[in-house]
Amino acid sequence: MTLIPHYVGIVGSEAAKFRHKSETQARMIIRRLLAPPESVLVSGGCHLGGIDIWSEEEYANLPDRALRPDPIIYLPAAHAWSSGYRPRNVKIAERADMVHNITVKDYPPGYEGMLFAKCYHCHTTTHVKSGGCWTAKYALRLGKQAYWHIV
């Protein structure tokens, strides 16, 4: 029996925004999302680590990985919004059947990156700002399903 691939977009926050516990929770979510044998990872290979890279690692370690297609990873052409991240995020949203954004509810102690009082994509204080939010919201505009997982 041939399985019809289901392209699962997994995006989210960079590694520095996670604590050990929230990384563990994020990886459990990723494994659950990729568990069905028809699931194929679609992500963005973020150079800052975090959800994109952990998704690739978890996909590579699936027990049936040898039976699955290679993941679809869209790297940004540049480390700039208009010429790199935006076009990369559009490709993820277009290719994925649904997008899952995994982010954190707050910044860890000592976080030294850019701090925002709220996620300006979602206009909420329930989670930190993430480029994954933009991608998930773009998927919704394309008529696709999008989910937020806040750890």
Image (cartoon, rainbow, N blue to C red):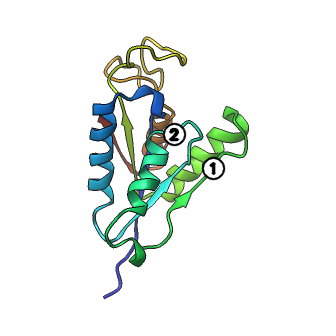
The answer to whether 117 is drawn above or below residue 120 in the figure is above
Query: Three-letter amino acid code at disc 1?
Result: Leu
Image position of 150 with respect to 140: above or below: above
Q: Position of residue 61 (x, y in %)?
A: 38, 62
Q: In the rendered structure, find residue 75 and report the number of the disc placed on it.
A: 1
- Residue drawn at x 58%, y 52% as measured from the top left: 91
Most distant residue in the top direction: 117
**Residue drawn where x is 48% and y is 46% of the image:** 52
Residue 56 rendering spot, x and y as whole percentages: 46, 55
> Percent x, y for residue 45?
56, 48
* Along the viewing direction, whichever of 51 and 123 lies nearer the viewer: 51
Which of the pair 31/132 is nearer the observer? Answer: 31
User: Can residue 151 be seen here?
Assistant: no
**Any part of residue 132 in sight:** yes
Label 2 environment density (alpha carbons within 10 Å; few <14, some 14–19, many ≥20): some
* Amino acid type, residue under disc 2 in the picture: Gly
Label 2 sits on a secondary structure element that is: loop
Residue 62 as seen in the image, left or right of residue 86: left
Q: Is residue 49 left or right of residue 58?
A: right
